[in-house]
Amino acid sequence: MLISELIALCASEEGVPPQAASWLLKYGWETGIEFTDQQSCDLLDVLVQADSWPLRLHILQLFAGLAIPGKQQETAYFHLRHCLSDNNKFVRA
């Protein structure tokens, strides 16, 4: 349940800064947590709407641990391609 709450904080403009919540998700993944298909889709939705580059970067760094369901793969591909032309060099990398 904590993972879903952190994902919701990533999408929120109130309270905890979204990049703080995404950093916690990234740290959790690096230490062994796994994301469900629904959580993976929710993170993809956050990536699509993210305004801050640190938030986008953290979610992009999580992509290796996400299982994107078939119906969302085309959307993921489109947004990953879009990130290749991002203004921030870290997101582009």
Image: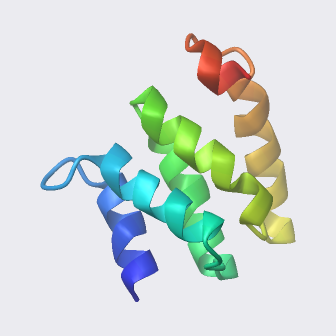
Residue furthest to the bottom: 1
Residue 10's image quarter?
bottom left
Query: x%, y% of residue 27?
Result: 52, 61
Task: Name the residue rendered at 38%, 82% in the picture.
Answer: 2
**What is the quadrant of residue 90 in the picture?**
top right
Q: How many marks?
A: 0
Q: Quadrant of the rendered structure where residue 29 is?
A: bottom right
Q: Quadrant of the N terminus?
A: bottom left
Q: Nearer the viewer, residue 89 or 12?
A: 89
The residue drawn where x is 61% and y is 79% is 33
Q: Is residue 83 above or below residue 74?
A: above
**Residue farthest left in this picture:** 15
| Nearest the eye: 44 or 74 | 44
The C terminus lies in which quarter of the figure?
Answer: top right
Report the colour scheme: rainbow
Q: Is residue 26 above or below residue 31?
A: above
Expressed as whole percent of the image width and height from the top left, the position of residue 22 reads 43, 54
Q: Position of residue 51 (x, y in %)?
A: 40, 31
Using the image, determine if residue 53 lies above or below residue 67.
above
User: Looking at the picture, does residue 84 appear above or below residue 41?
Assistant: above
